[in-house]
């Protein structure tokens, strides 16, 4: 009787989630499979698609611009996520301490995350301007530079410029994620460590870091996915230029689709990184599961 009741409850549970599964498939699944199919066609704006097999993938893989953009994407993700994690962890440790005005500081640190992406991008674009930008103006007034730095037009620095903005916007996510983990640590552990004569650094490595590591891993995984697929920040600030110096997969896909009007090829660009994202997610989730 008990087994029958458990079986009926299981059937009821699966029945109740069927509408959700169907809705997710309609909203996400169907467009995804349609886009995947179109990546194997010669689809262009205003014409019916014709199946051409792997031609699009062969063409993009033999294009040096694609490899440059893919390299930029990994630099953008690794540098951005790594520095956001480092800075976010340090600031989380700071605002976790008690000091006057702590609530105000926490509120100010949240502003970059809460600010509209378009407003933030346009503001930074103005700040980076070679002629009127406040960054070059301040650096020149202090004597640190003699000539304006081409933040947005220099092929060697454009990618760095958008990485800085990505870090500025993403640090608050790490701060408050890690801060939540810090506040769950039992303070008696620190008191016992101090009694044993453990230094602040020793307490951090032995107590703090292991305690917040699950939070760090989840936050890093989410940030890596978001950063890898970032579009708005780069498109509004540099447009991926100059000469694809700051272009990533998302902006390059947009360029091929809406400027070159080759939708099939653009979807093959997007589809080419799906295995990389899947591998990254599977590896990360397995790592989290094994650690738990």
Image (spheres, grey):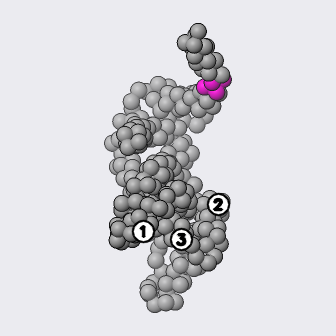
| Along the line of sight, the residue nearer the viewer: 183 or 175 | 183
Query: Which residue is tagged 3?
Result: 97
Residue 188 % position (x, y): 47, 61
Say whether disc 2 or disc 1 marks the residue closer to the N-terminus. 2
| Along the line of sight, the residue nearer the viewer: 19 or 41 | 19
Say whether disc 3 or disc 2 marks the residue closer to the N-terminus. 3
Residue 234 % position (x, y): 52, 58
Q: Compared to 231, does 289 lie above or below?
A: above
Look at the numbered discs 3 and 2 and tell me whether their residues touch, using CB distance below 8 Å: no
Crowdedness near tag 2: few (<14), some (14–19) or many (≥20) residues, C-alpha within 10 Å? few
- Residue 134 vs residue 242: left or right? right
Q: Secondary structure at mark 3?
A: loop
Q: Quarter of the image containing the N terminus?
A: top right
Residue 6 % position (x, y): 57, 16
Q: Quarter of the image containing the C terminus?
A: top left
Q: Is residue 80 magenta?
A: no
Q: Compared to 46, does 110 lie above or below?
A: below
| Along the line of sight, the residue nearer the viewer: 266 or 171 | 171
Crowdedness near tag 1: few (<14), some (14–19) or many (≥20) residues, C-alpha within 10 Å? some
Query: Which residue is tagged 2?
Result: 114
Crowdedness near tag 3: few (<14), some (14–19) or many (≥20) residues, C-alpha within 10 Å? few
- The CA span between labels 3 and 1 is 36 Å
In the image, which residues are magenta? 17-21
Residue 274 % position (x, y): 43, 38
Q: Is residue 196 visible?
A: yes
Query: Which residue is tagged 1?
Result: 157
Q: Compared to 123, does 132 lie above or below?
A: below
Q: Report the residue at 60% width, 25% height from top.
A: 21
Q: Nearer the viewer, mark 3 or mark 2?
A: 3
- The CA span between labels 2 and 1 is 27 Å
Say whether disc 3 or disc 1 marks the residue closer to the N-terminus. 3
Q: Quarter-wise, where is residue 104 in the image?
A: bottom right
């Amino acid at each position: 009787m008990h087994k029958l009741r458990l079986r009926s409850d299981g059937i009821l549970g699966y029945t109740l989630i069927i509408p959700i599964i169907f809705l997710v498939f309609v909203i996400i699944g169907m467009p995804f499979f349609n886009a995947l199919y179109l990546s194997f066609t010669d689809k262009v704006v205003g014409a019916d698609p014709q199946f051409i097999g792997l031609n699009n993938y062969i063409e993009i893989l033999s294009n040096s611009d694609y490899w440059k953009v893919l390299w930029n994407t990994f630099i953008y993700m690794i540098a951005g996520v790594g520095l956001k994690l480092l800075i976010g962890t340090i600031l989380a440790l700071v605002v976790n301490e008690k000091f006057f005005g702590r609530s105000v500081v926490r509120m100010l640190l949240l502003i970059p995350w809460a600010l509209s992406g378009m407003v933030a991008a346009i503001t930074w674009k103005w700040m980076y301007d070679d002629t009127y930008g406040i960054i070059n103006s301040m650096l020149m007034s202090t004597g640190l530079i003699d000539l304006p730095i081409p933040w947005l037009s220099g092929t060697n620095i454009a990618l760095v410029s958008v990485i800085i903005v990505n870090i500025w916007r993403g640090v608050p996510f790490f701060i408050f994620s890690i801060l939540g983990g810090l506040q769950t640590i039992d303070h008696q552990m620190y008191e016992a460590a101090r009694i044993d004569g453990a230094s602040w650094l020793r307490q951090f490595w032995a107590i703090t870091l292991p305690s917040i590591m699950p939070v760090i891993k989840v936050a890093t995984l989410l940030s890596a996915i978001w950063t890898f697929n970032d579009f708005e920040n780069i498109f509004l600030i540099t447009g991926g230029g100059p000469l694809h110096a700051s272009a990533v997969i998302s902006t390059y896909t947009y360029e091929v689709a809406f400027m070159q009007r080759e939708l099939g090829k653009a979807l093959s660009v997007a589809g080419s990184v799906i295995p990389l994202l899947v591998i990254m997610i599977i590896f990360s989730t397995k790592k989290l599961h094994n650690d738990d």
